[in-house]
Image: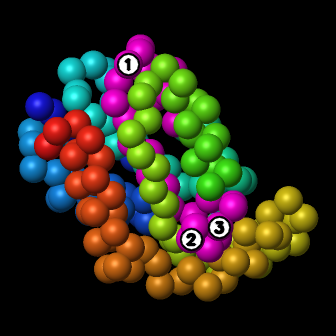
Amino acid sequence: MKALVTYYSETGNTEKLARSIYEAIHIDKELLPVQDVKNTQGYDIIFVGFPVQAHSVPAKLNPFFKGLTGGQNIALFCTHGSLRGGHLPKQALEHAVGLATRAKVLGTFGVRGKVDAKIIEELMKRVEHRAWAEEAQGAHEHPNEMDLADGKEFARGVLAKIGR
Ligand SMILES: Cc1cc2nc3c(=O)[nH]c(=O)nc-3n(C[C@H](O)[C@H](O)[C@H](O)COP(=O)(O)O)c2cc1C
């Protein structure tokens, strides 16, 4: 049994969550930035994480999703500035599920991740970003210890689905 945890991260939030998920896995495992994934074969489960950008999945993830040949078990996780459990991150995770049509999605998970105040200020000026950027003002302490612990719980739940 082997697991891959892979992620794309620009400011480190998603990487933190990826590392926490990785720590919770007690089978043979690998942790790789998504750019370094050459092959998605040979894993029993792949956890793939991304930062929500413009309500969706960054294009940097496209090669990974295209590389899914069929039938792989995957679990999706993300970090986002907007409120946890709200419709904004849900929309992005649904988009990711849509990109992973060739795989079997065993779970989705998201927590908040801080955004630089200057970036928020800039993005607030653009109407398409305003909704999440307003919410993101309260994300400066995330992902916190509780978020990372929830990430571990998510990982254990997914592993249970493959009998681990
Ligand atoms: C250009 C840009 C667009 C973003 N778009 C969204 C968004 O649509 N919704 C949201 O909740 N957060 C959005 N965020 C916030 C990031 O998802 C959040 O800060 C995330 O934790 C960053 O993860 P990283 O450090 O792994 O890159 C955006 C951030 C940037 C820089």
Q: Give the residue at x 38% y 73%.
A: 147
CA separation in Å, label 3 and label 1: 29 Å
Q: Residue at x 17, y 39 (%)?
A: 163
Residue type (three-letter) at the residue carrying disc 3: Gly
What amino acid type is highlighted by mark number 1?
Gly
Find residue 19 and name its label: none
Judged left or right of residue 27, residue 144 is right
- The residue range painted magenta reads 61-89
Q: Residue furthest top?
A: 69
Kindly tell me whether mark 3's CB lies below 8 Å from ligand 1.
Answer: no
Residue 51 point in image, percent of width and height: 54, 55
- Around disc 1, counting alpha carbons within 10 Å, would you say few (fewer than 14), some (14 to 19), or many (20 or more)? few
In what element is the residue under mark 2? loop
**Disc 1 marks which residue?**
71
Image x and y of residue 71, in percent: 38, 19
Inter-mark Cα distance, 2 to 3: 5 Å
Marks 2/3 in contact by CB < 8 Å: the verdict is yes
Distance from disc 2 to disc 1, alpha carbons, whole Å, reads 29 Å
Q: Secondary structure at mark 1?
A: loop
